[in-house]
Image (cartoon, grey):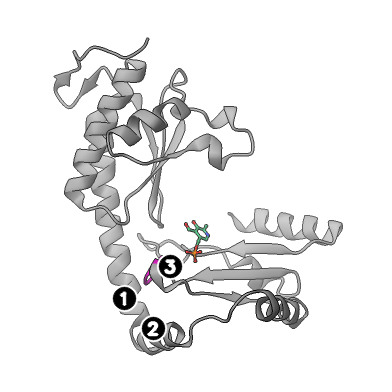
Amino acid sequence: MPLDRRHQLLGLARDYGVPIFEDECYSDLTWGGMQAPPALYSLDPQRVIHIGSFSKTLSPALRLGYVLCDWEFMSRMIAIKTERFSHTGALEQMVVAEYFSKHFQPHVDKLAGTLKEKLDTMVEAVEREFGTAVEPWLPKGGIYLWMKLPDQVDVRKLVQPALKAGIAFNPGPEWAVDGNAAKSRLRLCFALTTKEEIRDGVAAFAKVCYEEFGIPEQSGNVRHTASRASS
Ligand SMILES: Cc1ncc(COP(=O)(O)O)c(C=O)c1O
């Protein structure tokens, strides 16, 4: 989000008297020298609750994250956490503190490099398998590639056939305020899969898409001829 939009958002939050949760679990995983604008929290620490996670930078199984916010919020969150939920495991916290206090930057630099390579592999595969039928949106960080297919493709109808072929993806409508407007958009994750799985998975996904919607007509230099499930 550009700086001027951040200021606008903070202005709205002030006008309506509401706090903002700033969920920034991907902000350390960037590449290409991206200079992100300052966090909302740093622009208005009284109004913003900044949440981070070690799920993406270190390991999801640790179930550890962190919060930065004003004591007015923090004191209430601590009370709720202590009363309603069990405490966070001390051992996991000690492991993360020990490892990241010494190795944070080299670790995230290496991880970001690996993620960028996997993104490149995925973009190459998507362009090869879907050709001109696809518009990928190249991220400068994170673990997802968003892409748009032609308007006649409703990605919600691809979920089950894709699952049968062993592919899970995020349909755009589940991540949009206006679901119908995002019906041809989808998100693919490139974090856990190997480069080979990415290549095979995207090829299999293009085949599923062709079988359901007749798109893409061509993958690489192969013209699809398989019989289609529906038209
Ligand atoms: C934006 C965002 N916030 C938070 C989370 C969840 O993080 P955690 O594993 O720490 O619950 C995710 C996970 O996918 C995410 O994409």
Residue 9, placed above or below residue 76: above
Element marked by disc 3: loop
The residue at the point 24 percent across, 45 percent down is 198
Sequence-wise first label, 2 or 3: 3
User: How many neighbours does mark 3 have within 10 angstroms: few (below 14), some (14-19), or many (20 or more)?
Assistant: some
Label annotation for residue 193: none
* 139 lies left or right of 107: right
Dividing the picture into quadrants, the one containing residue 94 is bottom left
Label placed on residue 100: 2
The amino acid pointed to by label 2 is: Phe
- Quarter of the image with the N terminus is bottom right
Instruction: Look at the image and give the residue range highlighted in magenta.
Output: 56-60
Does the residue at mark 1 contact the one at mark 2 (Cβ under 8 Å)?
Answer: yes
Where disc 2 sits, the SS reads helix
Residue plotted at (59% across, 67% down)? 39
Q: Disc 2 vs disc 3: which is toward the camera? A: 3
The amino acid type found where label 1 is placed reads: His
Q: Which of 109 and 173 lies nearest the eye of the viewer?
A: 173
Mark 3: C-beta under 8 Å from nearest atom of ligand 1: yes
User: In the figure, is residue 184 to the left or right of 87?
Assistant: left
Rendered residue at 39%/83% (across/down):
100
The residue singled out by tag 1 in the image is: 107
Q: What residue type is labelled 3?
A: Ser
Kindly identify the residue that appears in the image at 75 percent across and 64 percent down: 19
Which residue is the site of mark 3? 55
Classified by dominant secondary structure, the portion drawn in magenta counts as loop
Distance of label 1 from label 2 (alpha carbons): 8 Å
Separation (CA) of disc 2 from disc 3: 13 Å
Residue 122 position within the rendered picture, expressed as x and y whole percent measured from the top left: 27, 44
Q: What element carries label 1?
A: helix
Q: Where is residue 147 in the image (x, y as percent from the top left)?
A: 41, 36
